[in-house]
Amino acid sequence: LEGASMEAPRMGNLYLEDPLLQGYLRAHLPAQVFAEVNVDLERFGARLRDEIDFLDRECELNPPRLLHFDAWGQRVDQVTTCPAWKRLKDISAEESLVAEGYKRRYSRWSRVYQIAKMYLFMSNSACYGCPLAMTDGAAKVIESLGIPKPLEEAYARLTSADPKTFWISGQWMTERKGGSDVGGGTETVARELPDGSYSLHGFKWFTSAADSEMTLTLARIVGPDGQVKQGSRGLSLFYLKIYEDGKLNGIKIERLKEKLGTRALPTAELLLDGARAHLISTEGQGIPYIANMLNITRIYNAVAAAGSMRRMVNLARDYATKREAFGKPLKDHPLHMQTLARMEVQSQAAFLLLMELARLLGLEETKAATEQEKHLLRLLTPLTKLYTAKQGIAMNSEGLECFGGQGFMEDTGLPVILRNSQVLSIWEGTTNILSLDVLRCILKSQGKALDVFFSTAQAKLEAATRQPELQASVQIIQNNLQKLKQFVRRMDSKGEAGWQLAA
Ligand code: MFK
Ligand code: FAD
């Protein structure tokens, strides 16, 4: 019937359609930096719309496959990804998506710029942000080690802006006995070889970016007496290449995971059967060394959450101008507008929290952070990860409802946004594990992290009080802050036991 077809929601230039992002960058970056970044992000926004959005869909429709044997019965364990996935890798290099964080062209502001760009990319790139997160995390670990000679090549490749040399890294931590309890659950052992390298034997239960070129992983070193040390203090950190001399490096790819979401991302189960690896941490210090990687990937998780919320709100907002019900567009129904307004506020809050992390990270990495800012960065990292992940799942679920039945239809490309959000509260530490990390951080800083949090929140509230329209909200937050302070005092008065209780 004439006029019976429906109009799809349209994705425009994500940068130009995001006044908060533009305003944030204009307000925070020095004028010259903003001028350059503004031009780049406008161009990138157009590239996302005109090129990358198509690749996103292609990857979803053509998930990776695993070939175990060739035609002649030889075990090959080949992960095949689609051309669009490979193209996303090249684009990531061309756009300096990881490199910018390490080249630091804009000094402390490079992280703000990089994370803003990643925020635009992440929501439209079939989870390619996941391999990039691990790549950035691996670069961070290597940089924190002072880029020792044996890791120079890996560092140069991870931070390369040239598709021909760019490498992706994996992050192999989870084993069958435990993904949260890495210290208790890791069974992989490392035997020293005559040349000083190690041979790894074990089973890694979840390894995303199974098509990566290298990885960082944990194992227990077998001592001269044949014994290994148990617990997290028994873990050491290793670097290994996935291929050596053109062959898998003592690795068998047992299976690709069948997942609810992140289907474009090859996540594998790997048997390590003599993989040659290099010890890169002090023996027994694997967890604190890999924590540098965790803290970066957790920030990326917040990028993914905030980015997906922004994409969902933009699409829902556009649809509200096109879809009519009861004789007028959805946008003219106050109740629907209230739903959209709530989503918009959630999305903006997630973005601002994320950018605060980016700002603090930039300060820390250029040695410009005060002790207080370092405490705040450490505290806000798990908090932002856990909070935005939960927000992302809830908001993207609400978002589907904004499209009515169409929100449930696979070929609209909408359900995948929710499916991909659902993992954000699981990987890189579940919500409870991150809550415990918040407590770890408070205890380790002897309460300083919390003091900084309270004083920073107080200062922001006082600034907000000057705006009459914010009075009511300020009062609610003020009350909550007071309650939190009282809770903290109560727990503190019980000493260590109080914090265990809080946990
Ligand atoms: C889209 C973007 C996202 C990209 C996703 C990529 C794909 C997904 C990849 C993954 O999911 S990778 C696997 C992620 N796995 C986890 O997040 C593990 C969750 N478990 C934890 O986080 C545990 O807390 C942890 C294994 C880190 C530690 O447990 P333990 O054994 O109870 O540790 P313990 O003894 O408290 O801490 C050991 C040391 O590490 C301590 O330092 P010291 O020895 O100096 O005292 C801790 O302070 C330090 N530490 C732990 N977490 C830290 C940290 N230091 C800094 N930052 C942290 N976050
Ligand atoms: P468990 O540790 O068994 O947790 C089960 C439940 O118990 C959770 O709700 C948890 O919060 C709760 N729990 C556990 N301990 C406590 C506690 N002390 N207090 C309160 N609650 C607790 N891992 C990698 O290393 N590399 C990867 O590349 C990777 N990619 C992944 C990709 C996908 C799509 C998924 C889903 C996972 C991936 N993971 C990867 C694994 C992921 O990091 C783990 O699944 C996650 O850390 C949780 O570990 P687990 O599955 O063993 O759950």
Image: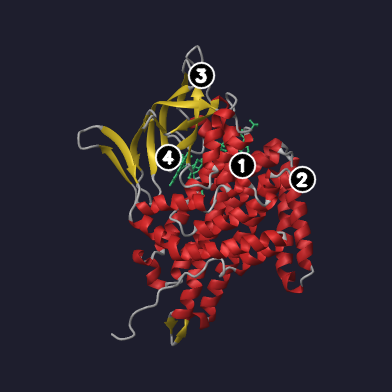
Q: What element carries label 2?
A: loop
Q: Whole-Å distance between the Cαs marked 1 and 2?
A: 22 Å
Q: Assess whether mark 2 and mark 1 are in contact (beta carbons under 8 angstroms).
A: no
Residue closest to the far bottom: 327
Mark 4 residue crowding within 10 angstroms, few (<14) / some (14–19) / many (20+): many
First in sequence: mark 1 vs mark 3? 3
Q: Whole-Å distance between the Cαs marked 2 and 3?
A: 40 Å
Query: Which residue position holds label 2?
Result: 370
Which quarter of the picture shows residue 327? bottom left
Residue 162 shows in the view: yes
Task: Depth check: give the residue in front, 372 or 55.
Answer: 55
Task: Depth check: give the residue in front, 477 or 176.
Answer: 176
Q: Whole-Å distance between the Cαs marked 3 and 4?
A: 28 Å
- Where does the image place residue 403, in percent across and percent down from the top left? 43, 72
- Looking at the rendered image, the disc whose residue lies closer to the viewer, 2 or 3, is 3
Q: In this image, 213 relative to 234: left or right?
A: left
Q: What element carries label 3?
A: loop
Look at label 1 and name its amino acid. Answer: Asp
Q: Whole-Å distance between the Cαs marked 1 and 4?
A: 22 Å
Question: Which label was assigned to residue 437?
Answer: 1
Q: Quadrant of the C terminus?
A: top right
Q: Assess whether mark 4 and mark 1 are in contact (beta carbons under 8 angstroms).
A: no
First in sequence: mark 4 vs mark 2? 4
Query: Which residue position holds label 3?
Result: 196
Look at label 4 and name its amino acid. Answer: Phe
